[in-house]
Amino acid sequence: MGASPSHVPACPPPRAQLHPAPHVRTRLPPCPPPSSSSAAAYKYATADAASPTSAARMDGGAATDAEELRADFLRVLRGRRSDEVELSVEPAKPVENPLYQDANPPSFSEEMQSCPKENIENLKELIKEENVYLITEKGEQGRLPLLIISLKEDIVRKRPAVVFLHSTRKCKEWLRPLLEAYASRGYIAVAVDSRYHGERASSLTTYSEALVSSWKKGDTMPFIFDTVWDLIKLADYLTKREDIDPSRIGITGESLGG
């Protein structure tokens, strides 16, 4: 007995519509403009509200201007800082016993050692090492330790720079194989201690305690926000150096630093 017309299933679209040809590039539709309720529900982490212009753009569904977005984000960062200070540089000494917040601290990384580098026989003798602190704000965590590795040169010239961020419970010294490898290829390689790590830690539980404090009290931002603040200040410092090309500064990281 044949099915009645009301029970006949709709014909599927042609296979070509289900599976576009490989050479056809599909585009996702633009996100719908946020509703007034969703825009109103968004709150900043500080008392600063979004600028009227930004709110108007959101309500109108237009793309937020990059400069306004950056200004809004900086207000969030500054609203959670201890008193700001003028960026300054202080000398530091090499760290003899780096602090790793692991029960069994690592001593070797095959991945780090495998980074491509120039075959320079006396590379260790040609390396220039700098240890400095950047003072980015008041308070214990306002001192940003830097390890900078480059090749010695008789004439100062502007070279490209790469900033490296370490993984959880590690420190800037962990990245030394990468720094030396990139330095051998002509880069100025820079590593920092993330907040509550390395020289910015005092025990094996410093980072864990900071996380708990952040979740319970909201008094710290040990994840992205604090890192962004430090990197903004680092960029201010690097772009003013005579030996770094400000238009050729890159950044990369491992795990937490990525």
Image: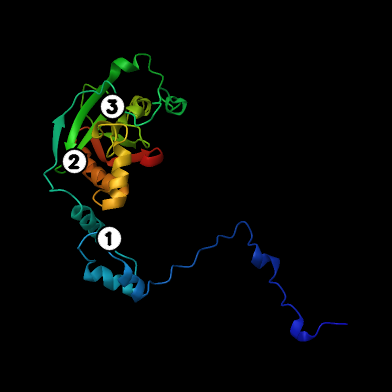
Q: Secondary structure at mark 3?
A: strand
Residue 109 position within the rendered picture, expressed as x and y whole percent measured from the top left: 44, 26
Please report the residue visible at 22 percent of the width from the left and 58 percent of the height from the top: 71
Of the pair 156 and 45, the residue shown nearer to us:
45
Q: Which of the labelled discs sits on residue 149, or is there none?
A: 3
Residue 105 position within the rendered picture, expressed as x and y whole percent measured from the top left: 38, 26
Q: Secondary structure at mark 2?
A: helix
| Mark 1 / mark 3, whichever is N-terminal | 1
Residue 100 position within the rendered picture, expressed as x and y whole percent measured from the top left: 34, 29
Please report the residue visible at 19 percent of the width from the left and 55 percent of the height from the top: 79
Q: Where does label 2 land, which residue?
A: 142
Q: Residue furthest front?
A: 216
Q: Does residue 71 appear anywhere in the picture?
A: yes
Of labels 2 and 3, the one closer to you: 2
Q: Which of the labelled discs sits on residue 88, or is there none?
A: none
Asked which colour scheme the image uses, the reply is: rainbow
| Mark 2 / mark 3, whichever is N-terminal | 2
In which image quadrant can residue 149 be found? Answer: top left
Of the pair 68 and 95, the residue shown nearer to us:
95
| Mark 2 / mark 1, whichever is N-terminal | 1
Quadrant including the N terminus: bottom right
In which image quadrant can residue 159 be found? Answer: top left
Q: Which of the labelled discs sits on residue 69, or is there none?
A: 1
Amino acid under disc 3: Ile
Q: CA distance from mark 2 to mark 1?
A: 25 Å
